[in-house]
Amino acid sequence: MGTSTTEAADPAAKAHDIEQNLKTAVRASGLSLLDEPTRDEQGCVVGYLLQPLSQNGPDPVDATVKSLHDDGWGDERRTQVKGMRRVTLTKAGWTLRVRDYSAQQAKRGFVALLATKASCKPS
């Protein structure tokens, strides 16, 4: 598999940069952090577990995705699986999965963001 144009243009996209993108999106979204961000030692994974601040108002997942688009994330794909809304975005060799469980009260209505770097090998 070759290097994407985005990755070639920005080969230095590090976990810290990705984490800053996610923090910006979370602040803009109406979501609150449920736990400390997930990071691995190799800089291959950045994740957040979030909860909507309010049931009223704009859709926090759409606000998150809009903010991420503003930060250069693209190639959006949306799917719906058993009541879970999933949005996948890519940027500079990273794939971000936004999983929205907010409609599932059994899951306590959370939203998960998980970004993984394509060049990393699973351990």
Image (cartoon, helix red, strand yellow):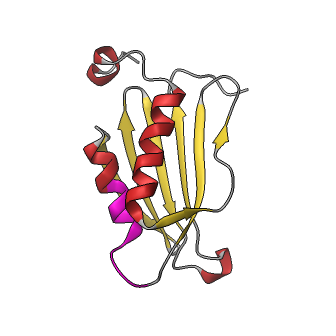
At 41% across and 18% down in the image, what residue appears? 1
Q: Is residue 20 above or below residue 67?
A: above
**Left or right of 67 in this view: 118:** right
Q: Return the x and y of residue 68 as percentages of the image width and height.
A: 34, 47
At 58% across and 39% down in the image, what residue appears? 46
Q: Nearer the viewer, residue 121 or 45?
A: 45
Q: Return the x and y of residue 95 as percentages of the image width and height.
A: 45, 38
The quadrant of the picture occupied by the C terminus is top right
At 26% across and 45% down in the image, what residue appears? 70
Q: Is residue 1 above or below residue 68?
A: above
At 46% across and 45% down in the image, what residue appears? 22
Q: Quadrant of residue 62?
A: bottom left
Q: Is residue 60 magenta?
A: yes
Q: Nearer the viewer, residue 78 or 92?
A: 92
Q: Is residue 43 magenta?
A: no
Chief secondary structure of the magenta portion: helix
**Left or right of 37 in this view: 115:** left
Q: Nearer the viewer, residue 72 or 87?
A: 72
Q: Return the x and y of residue 114 as percentages of the image width and height.
A: 55, 46
Q: Is residue 2 above or below residue 106?
A: above
Q: Is residue 7 above or below residue 90?
A: above
**Left or right of 44 in this view: 86:** left
Q: Which residues are magenta?
A: 56-65
Query: How many numbered marks does the figure carry?
Result: 0
Q: Nearer the viewer, residue 26 or 40?
A: 26
**Left or right of 51 in this view: 90:** left
